[in-house]
Image (tube, grey):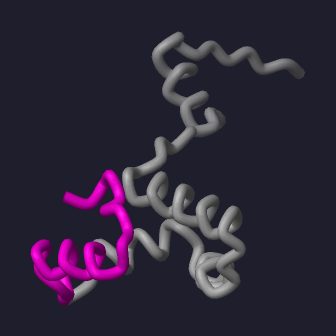
Amino acid sequence: MTQIVTVSPATAAYASLGMKTTTRSHTLFEERIHHWSEDAKVRGDARVLAVLNVIQPPALALALLTAPDLRPQVTVAEAQRRYDENGQEVPPDVD
C-alpha cells in the first residue's frame, strides 16, 4: 500500500525553518568583553582571566546591563587628575 502526500511550497518552507541553524550577532557588550579578555591574555592578568572563565560573556553582559548602580565611581576631572599624577596618558576611549 502506498500513500502519496502533497505539500504546498509555502508549507514546506515553513516546516523547513525549524531545521535552519541561526547565527546570532554579537552584542556590543560581548565584543567589549572579548576585547577585554584578549587584552588580559596579552597583559597576563590572571585575575581577569579567572573571572572571565567563570562568568561567560552572555551572563557577564547581563550582569553589566542589570547592575543596580551604574554611576561612575569618580568624576571625569578626578580621573584626569589621577592620570596626570601618575604620569600616564588617558586611554583613547576615556573622555
> Which of 40 and 85 lies nearest the eye of the viewer?
85
Which of the image's four quarters has the N terminus? top right
Q: Is residue 58 magenta?
A: no
> Which of 19 and 9 lies nearest the eye of the viewer?
19
Relative placement, left or right, of 40 versus 75 is right
Residue 32 position, x and y percent, is: 45, 57
- The structure residue drawn at horizontal position 31% and vertical position 54%, both measured from the top left corner, is 93
Which of the image's four quarters has the C terminus? bottom left
Query: In this picture, is 69 found above or below 14?
Result: below
Residue 83 position, x and y percent, is: 29, 74
Residue 80 position, x and y percent, is: 20, 72
Q: Is residue 78 magenta?
A: yes
Magenta stretch: dominant SS?
loop
**Image quarter of residue 4:** top right
The magenta-colored residue range is 69-95
**Image quarter of residue 40:** bottom right
In the displayed orientation, state which residue is furthest to the right: 1
Relative placement, left or right, of 2 versus 62 is right
Relative placement, left or right, of 10 versus 46 is left
- The structure residue drawn at horizontal position 26% and vertical position 74%, both measured from the top left corner, is 84
- The structure residue drawn at horizontal position 60% and vertical position 28%, both measured from the top left corner, is 16
Q: Can residue 71 be seen here? A: no
**Image quarter of residue 68:** bottom left
> Which of 42 and 19 lies nearest the eye of the viewer?
42
